[in-house]
Image (spheres, grey):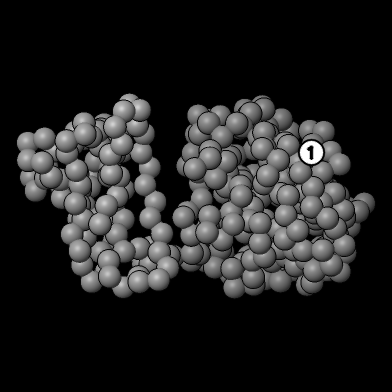
């Protein structure tokens, strides 16, 4: 999994999530190719920006927005109301390849402006979106569109309905958080998770994001073995399944794998992990998927990773 989608869930990646940015720490931002300008506070999943000097940029691979269908979801806590006479940018991207959203000034009627594929999609009237704008509180904006059909929701409320403006996909290589691409229009407040999907999210998705009730697909797992320290059960020589109690038992007696300090185990070629058969593992007779993260320490004799 790439660093640019590390803050996405498996279900979100299934729904074509192509960019997922979080703000756990400065190190977390740097790990995802982010560069912090000014002195914003980065902690607890939020970037706190002062409206004058702070913003964040990310280097993109070029594959995050190149889709005829795009959906963008951003959480933010504004320290300003919609009638403040300052332009405030939520996000922007490379010149001539712009995807952006910002609140304009009094002279421009405080409209909320949206660009997709470097095309002005809409300037949403203040009277349309301001009733749902929460100062100093969590807001969730979802923009979802394809050419000639773009909609937007603020906190689960429709503020742009099937705009007919035509646009085509672009490939920005830089993404700006809390600033325009030329470093103007700085955001004042907190910005939280930002996610981009190469597909169309719906009105129900917008409501689910706002209610924090999105993509609860863990119940679809037959088993889920995170292999973290909290799931390590040395007494019973097993690692615990956090989904359906299909715990993985270590084989080969005293030669069981060694627990890594973080996640996972070290196998020396003689030990193994056994997930016993169960009703849960028999219900998926047609469609199923298995995901395993591993790193080989030698290019020698092949070993079975999964066998049945």
Specify the quadrant of the image occupied by residue 21.
top right
Give the quarter of the image for residue 172.
Answer: top right
Is there any visible trace of residue 175 in the rendered image?
Answer: no
Tell me the quarter of the image containing the C terminus.
bottom left
Q: Is residue 40 left or right of residue 128?
A: left
Q: Residue at x 38, y 42 (%)?
A: 293
Front residue of 157 and 168: 168
Pointer 1 local density, CA inside 10 Å: few below 14, some 14–19, many at least 20: many
Task: Kindly identify the residue that appears in the image at 64 percent across and 66 percent down.
Answer: 201
Report the residue marked by disc 1: 94
Residue 93 location, x and y as percent?
A: 76, 41
Judged from the image, the secondary structure of the residue bearing numbered disc 1 is loop
Residue at the location (50% across, 64% down)? 214
Q: Is residue 227 visible?
A: yes
Q: Can you name the residue that lies furthest to the right here?
A: 107
Number of numbered labels in the structure image: 1
- The residue at 38%/67% (across/down) is 220
Position above or below: 89 against 258: below
Q: Position of residue 159 (x, y in %)?
A: 75, 68
- The answer to whether residue 229 is above or below residue 105 is above
Depicted 93 relative to depicted 136: above or below: above
Q: Whole-percent x and y of residue 187? A: 71, 42
Q: Nearer the viewer, residue 185 or 63?
A: 63
Percent coordinates x, y for residue 7 in the rendering:
51, 46
Q: Residue furthest front?
A: 301
**Left or right of 135, for residue 147:** right
């Amino acid at each position: 999994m790439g660093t640019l989608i590390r803050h996405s869930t498996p279900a979100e990646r299934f729904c074509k999530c192509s960019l997922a940015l979080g703000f756990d720490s400065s190190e977390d931002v740097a790990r995802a190719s982010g560069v912090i300008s000014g002195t914003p506070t980065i902690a607890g999943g939020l970037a706190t920006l002062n409206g004058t000097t702070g913003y964040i940029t990310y280097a993109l691979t070029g594959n995050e927005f190149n889709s005829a269908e795009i959906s963008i979801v951003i959480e933010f806590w504004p320290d300003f109301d919609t009638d403040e006479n300052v332009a405030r940018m939520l996000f922007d991207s490379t010149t001539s390849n712009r995807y952006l959203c910002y609140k304009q000034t009094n002279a421009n009627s405080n409209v909320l402006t949206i660009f997709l594929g470097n095309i002005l999609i809409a300037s949403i009237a203040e009277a349309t979106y301001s009733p749902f704008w929460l100062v100093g509180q969590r807001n969730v904006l979802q923009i979802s569109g394809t050419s000639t059909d773009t909609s937007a929701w603020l906190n689960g409320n429709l503020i742009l309905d099937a705009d007919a403006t035509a646009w085509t996909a672009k490939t920005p290589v830089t993404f700006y958080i809390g600033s325009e691409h030329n470093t103007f229009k700085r955001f004042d407040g907190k910005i939280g998770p930002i996610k981009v999907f190469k597909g169309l999210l719906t009105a129900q998705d917008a409501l689910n994001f706002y209610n924090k009730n999105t993509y609860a697909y863990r119940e679809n797992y037959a088993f889920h073995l995170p292999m973290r320290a909290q799931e390590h059960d040395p007494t019973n020589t097993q690692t615990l399944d956090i989904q359906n109690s299909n715990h993985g038992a270590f084989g080969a007696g005293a030669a069981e794998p060694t627990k890594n300090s973080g996640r996972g185990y070290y196998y020396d070629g003689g030990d193994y992990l056994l997930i016993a058969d169960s009703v849960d593992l028999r219900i998926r007779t047609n469609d199923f998927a298995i995901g395993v993260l591993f790193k080989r320490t030698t290019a020698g004799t092949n070993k079975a990773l999964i066998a049945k």
